[in-house]
Amino acid sequence: MTFHLARYLAAFFALFAVSSLRAQSADELNTQGDAHYEARRFTEAADCYRRAAEAGHPRAQTNLGYLYRSGEGVPKDPHQAMLWYRRAADKGDALAQAQVGFLYTHGYGCPKDYERALYWLRLSAEQNHPRGLANLAYMHYQGLGTPQDYTEARKIYEKAAALGEPAALYNLAVIYDKAYGVPQNSETAAIYYEKAAIAGHAQARFITAGLYESARGVAHDQEKSLHYYRLACADGIAEACKKLPKN
């Protein structure tokens, strides 16, 4: 009896050790993939993410899904993007859930399905993920699968904006700029446009530059205007490049 118990325990701990090693290796592969991606070595990143993803690592599965969506390091393939996002989403990865919801919203790699989009976006938002919150707010903002409700959209955008989500900051600016469910307020709109610009939102940078140039919602400031035009130009907005001085 004691001998058999000892063999059972030895086998159990050996299996536990192997499982821990596999999990650790997947973590390391995902971290290596992140490093390759930051260095723009996309093929190497894809290889690391794939190996970790195939071992069941949720964030690596999300990262691999992103590469298939963007076509970096692998051929662009919306169906593979959805496949890997869905695997991670099923494991509770909040970013993957937000992405699955986004894909169902726009019919990318799957038929459009607003009901399923809302299901996954709500799961992500329940985890307070900024992307999930912003995408859920968009559904209310546009009235996709749910009645259009600018007030509800604004409340959810505010939660995402508090977490620094650029798209949420930008859309709050639009809400105040265009008076969607709130009184028009150029000053509040300008605050959100600039916050979105600082967070890296390209269109917000272009608009913020124009606000400082025209003194709309902010005091005229040519230096800040040029600063944001340069950033927007670097982001690929051709109209911003035309605003820069020619040397």
Image (cartoon, rainbow, N blue to C red):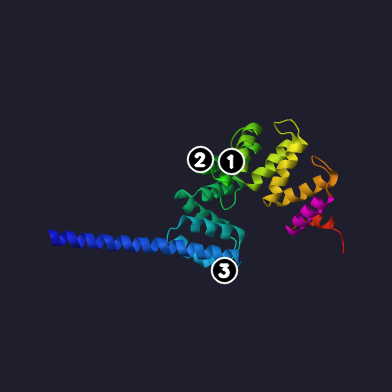
Residue at figure coordinates x 62%, y 38% from the top left: 158
Is residue 221 placed above or below 30 in the rendered structure?
above
For the image shown, how many numbered marks are present on the structure?
Answer: 3
Q: Element under label 3?
A: helix
Counting from the top left corner in percent of width and height, residue 90 is at 45, 49
The amino acid marked with disc number 2 is: Glu
Left or right: residue 149 compared with residue 56: right
Left or right: residue 31 compared with residue 186: left
Residue that sits furthest to the left in the current view: 1
Nearer to us: label 2 or label 3: 2
Magenta segment boundaries in residue numbering: 222-235
Residue at figure coordinates x 71%, y 40% from the top left: 173
Q: Are marks 1 and 3 in contact (CB under 8 Å)?
A: no
Dot 3: within a 10 Å radius of its alpha carbon, few (fewer than 14), some, or many (20 or more) residues?
some
**Picture disc at residue 43:** 3
Does the magenta run of residues contain 191?
no
Answer with mark 2 or mark 3, whichever residue precedes in sequence: 3
Q: CA distance from mark 1 to mark 3?
A: 32 Å
To which residue does mark 1 refer? 136
Q: Nearer the viewer, residue 27 or 57?
A: 27
Counting from the top left corner in percent of width and height, residue 240 is at 80, 54
Does the magenta run of residues contain 224?
yes
Answer with mark 2 or mark 1, whichever residue precedes in sequence: 2
To which residue does mark 2 refer? 126
Q: CA distance from mark 2 to mark 1?
A: 11 Å
Left or right: residue 48 compared with residue 187: left
The C terminus sits in image quarter? bottom right
Dot 2: within a 10 Å radius of its alpha carbon, few (fewer than 14), some, or many (20 or more) residues?
few
Q: Are marks 2 and 3 in contact (CB under 8 Å)?
A: no
Residue at figure coordinates x 49%, y 56% from the top left: 59
